[in-house]
Image: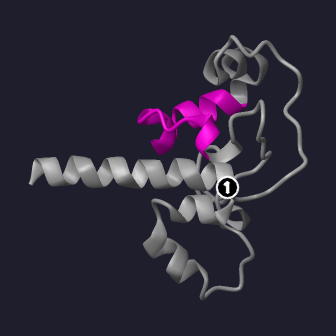
Amino acid sequence: MKKFYLITLFLVAIGIVSLGFTNNQSDEKHPDVDWSIGCQDCHAEETPDIYKAWENSSHGMVNFGCYICHGDGEVTFYSQGSDATCGGCHAGQLVEFEKTKFNSCYDCHNGHTLKFHNE
């Protein structure tokens, strides 16, 4: 059973990563940076409040990387993730969300803490 769980988790992770690189076609560009430095190292220094919010979130606690929502930064960059990317893990919530009047997961959720805006 544990092996099945790990394989399923791995396949879901692969699906999320592929969604992050195929959805949200965008002409946005990440600011020019030293690409030898990882996202976390740079953002911990350059945008410490945003980095700390992510680090303390459920995604940060399991090291759910920036690239999953924002692309790799060099070739593909999205300033905001997409609902389809969220749906890679949160498919059940996405089905319920589609029944609401909202346009995006981010209408209610902060993009880095993932908490509701009124929390």
**Quadrant housing residue 41:** top right
Residue 25 vs 112, above or below: the answer is: below
Name which residue lies at 45% across and 59% down.
Answer: 89
Residue 116 sits inside the magenta stretch = no
Q: How is the image coloured?
A: one colour
Q: Is residue 110 visible?
A: no
Please provide the residue range marked out in magenta.
Answer: 50-68
Residue 37 vs 18, above or below: the answer is: above
Name which residue lies at 54% across and 31% down.
Answer: 55
**Quadrant housing residue 116:** bottom right
Relative placement, left or right, of 21 versus 34 is left
Q: Residues within 10 Å of mark 1 (few under 14, many from 20)?
A: few
* Amino acid on which the number 1 mark rests in the picture: Thr
Residue 93 vs 82, above or below: the answer is: below
Name which residue lies at 69% across and 35% down.
Answer: 72
Residue 56 position, x and y percent, is 51, 34
Residue 24 vs 57, above or below: the answer is: below
Closest to the observer, 39 or 102: 39
Name which residue lies at 61% across and 83% down.
Answer: 98
Residue 100 position, x and y percent, is 64, 85
Quadrant placement of the C terminus? bottom right
Relative placement, left or right, of 114 versus 9 is right
Relative placement, left or right, of 76 versus 113 is right
What secondary structure is found at the residue carrying circle 1? Answer: helix
Residue 59 sits inside the magenta stretch = yes
Quadrant placement of the N terminus? bottom left
Closest to the observer, 2 or 105: 2
